[in-house]
Amino acid sequence: HQLSWILVTAVFFGVGFGLVLPTLYSTLANLAPSDFRSSVLAAGTGAGFLGQFISPILLGPVLGYSGLEGVFYAAAIVALVAGLLLFAPKG
């Protein structure tokens, strides 16, 4: 029973990730000036891998202190702050 739920969620995650990632790179390519397109795509890819590298380092202590639920809350707070900074009025 538990294994079937793991399989269902893995498929759901894979389909979602498979839809989001190409859309992200397509949007990056469309927004970038043609002279800098390869650099923008490389920076986007690098940022993704940097996040995968840094998140266990930063969230490991959170896991030890407050468990897995705390990790999700901390990641949600970081995402919320990043979103607010991204969409904050400029000027």
Image (cartoon, rainbow, N blue to C red):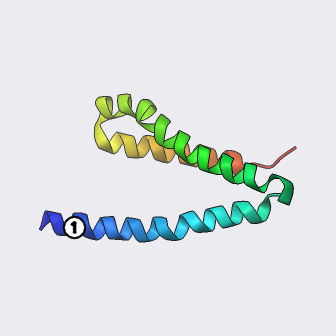
Q: Position of residue 41 (x, y in %)?
A: 68, 54
Q: Is residue 25 visible?
A: yes
Vertical relation: 32 (above or below) 56: below
Q: Residues within 10 Å of mark 1 (few under 14, many from 20)?
A: few
Dividing the picture into quarters, in which one does residue 68 lie?
Answer: top left
Q: Quadrant of the rendered structure where residue 6 is?
A: bottom left
- Closer to us: 22 or 84: 22
Q: In this view, does 33 lie to the left or right of 22?
A: right
Q: Quick check: 44 above or below 28? A: above
Q: Where is residue 13 in the image (x, y as percent from the top left)?
A: 39, 65
Name the residue that disc number 1 marks.
5
**In x, y percent, where is residue 47?**
60, 44
Q: Which amino acid does label 1 sit on?
A: Trp
- Depth check, front residue: 63 or 73: 63
Decide if residue 43 is on the left or right side of residue 7: right
Residue positioned 11% across, 68% down in the render: 1
The residue at 32%/44% (across/down) is 69
Query: Can you say which quadrant of the picture contains the C terminus?
Result: top right
Q: Residue 21 in the image: state x and y as whole percent.
A: 55, 63
Residue under the image location 76 percent in, 66 percent down: 30
